Amino acid sequence: MNLAVLVYTFLLRTKKFRKIDLVFDAMLITACFGSVMQGPGMVQRFIDLMMNPATMMIMAWGFATDSMVKGTEYQALLFTRPLTRSSYVVSKTIMTWLGAQLVFWKCFLALLAANLLLHPKTVTFFTGWDVLYIVANTLSFGALAVAVHRLPTKWAGLAYILLFYSYLGGAAMPAGVKFTGSAQSATVPMEMTRDALSHVLYPVIDLEAVFHSTTFSIVPILAYISNILIYITLATIMLNRREFSYAQD
Amino acid sequence: MISVTNLSKTYKRGKIKALNDVNFTVNEGEVLGLIGPNGAGKTTLMECMLGLIFPSSGEVQINGYNPSHIEVKKIIGFLPEREKYDSWMNAREFLGYHYMLSRQPLGGAKTAIEEALDTVQLVAEARTRPLSTYSKGMLQRVGLAQMIVGKPRLCFLDEPTSGLDPTSRNVVRDVIRSWKNEKVTVVLNSHNLDEVERVCDRVAFVYGGRIATIEKYGEAEDQFTVIVKWSGPEDAFRRLEEIGKHAELELSLAEGSSARFILSSKQQLPQLARSLVNAQIDVEEMFIEKKGLEKLFEQGWRQLNEK
């Protein structure tokens, strides 16, 4: 892990994106007030939205990026420093994890403030399991975001959009698609395929389900950990294979 | 310090040869200049030495290590050609980041950063401004400062004075000279022959992915031109022609009240001065016009054409 990369990533997100953050904060506060005014059901939906993997992908994005500088010349300068590419990937993953949580808890505080101003009474936003869910899954999405960002620049944005929309599409499919006739028999394998794919592409772990089940299974935990390790390994391999040449830029 | 052996780099499955069987060494404390036309392979060669791109064949070794080795990265400083730095940072933040990256002791960061900024003569007012507000010269100074904070023993500079004003060029030269005095090894890639002449110990002419010739700067300087300017009547030129014949010097060009002698060695210089005094020519100015690297360029072209 590299301290310089951790500090730099934090500065990049908090300083570079300051103007965008102000717009984001204004939207967030408006959404929080709107949700609180609509009542507890809407507040719950707002929280569900924040805990959605698609939202987590967005929260992780700004911290996973290398720099806002186009071309490879800046990265060339970076990798002439005594910085191993694996430590760079690990540092980025950790900072993306911490950063995504920073964004998440900022949302939570805005919601809390809106509730205190409009309905000054005790409310429960999260259970302890929800907090664990957030802590665990921002790590996996952080690793996924860092891996995607290690693709060549022109592919990274496209891959991220594909992941985001394929998740939304996958999540909406069971409600929107009704199989009839002979196609009904295809429903079960299709759902199984989708679940299997989603475990790889969207590494979410529901710790409450794991520990509250009548039978404890280690498989979801192993799958979750192995996914994170695969993403970190893939990111390191991709970075190690990349050449940083600006001769042809 | 640097050993490059049979180095080749190809792109598009061998169709484009960026480097073709390059061999040379750079000794510790030496300043090596890389000169050559655009697209000759100078930057690619530098990138191979920095471990940023991987050779197709052959190898580069720095102090016995592969250039990607962490022990090599600890001693390297690099100034890229274009100043693509994080524009939202200010100079102090940028140098702080590179100070940390170069694994210097955290306690001395503030002093080292201010010293580096003083060395490159960046005005105090600019040090807290975002880099996006900097001119090209100021960015180049910050680029040099990021090298300095890393306390490098091996420096790579890619076109360090390209597009700079004379003051900024002098800052770059002063920094290179100070490294030279501290026995820091420097590899300088430049189109600016005057700059290379001023600071380099050896010069390599790169063309078509090959090193056509590599010479000590002193060797490249074995033939030079002396310009003589005089006051008074222009017919002094006739007397200069006689001087040239008498001293076996080549009078290459003369216009108005000036003449150009080509000397084959510096030993001929006192002889020329004596002849001018004896001929009673009112010499106003007499200086050496260095032609060494131009000659090296020509020599490089000639050798390539012969190959």
Image: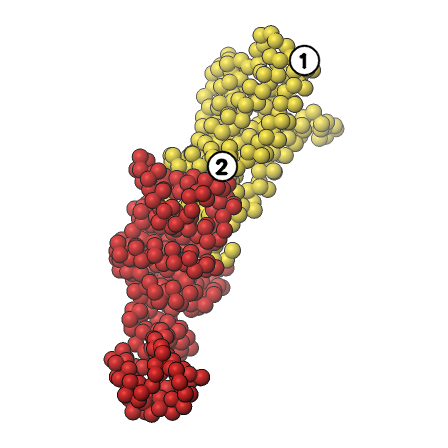
Chain colours: A yellow, B red
Label placed on residue A12: 2
From the viewer's perspective, tell me whether residue A6 is left or right of residue B24: right
Please give the residue where the numbered disc 1 appears in the rendered image.
Answer: A39
Dot 1: element: loop
Relative height, residue A92 to residue A111 (above, below): below
Identity of the amino acid at label 2? Leu
Q: Which residue is the extreme one toward the right?
A: A181
User: Percent position (x, y) of residue A142?
Assistant: 50, 31
User: Percent position (x, y) of residue B137?
Assistant: 46, 53
Camera-nearest residue between A246 and B178:
B178
From the viewer's perspective, tell me whether residue A53 is left or right of residue B257: right
Q: What is the chain identity of the residue bearing mark 1?
A: A
Identity of the amino acid at label 1? Gly
Camera-nearest residue between B124 and A187:
B124
Viewer can see residue B284: yes
Q: What is the chain identity of the residue bearing mark 2?
A: A
Looking at the image, which residue is at 38% across and 58% down?
B170
Viewer can see residue A231: no
Viewport quadrant of the N terminus of chain A: top left
User: Is the residue marked by circle 1 packed among few (<14), some (14-19), or many (20+) residues within 10 Å?
Assistant: few
Looking at the image, which residue is at 34% across and 65% down?
B198
Relative height, residue B87 to residue B157 (above, below): above
**CA distance separating discs 2 and 1:** 37 Å
Camera-nearest residue between A28 and A168:
A28
Looking at the image, which residue is at 71% across and 30% down?
A183
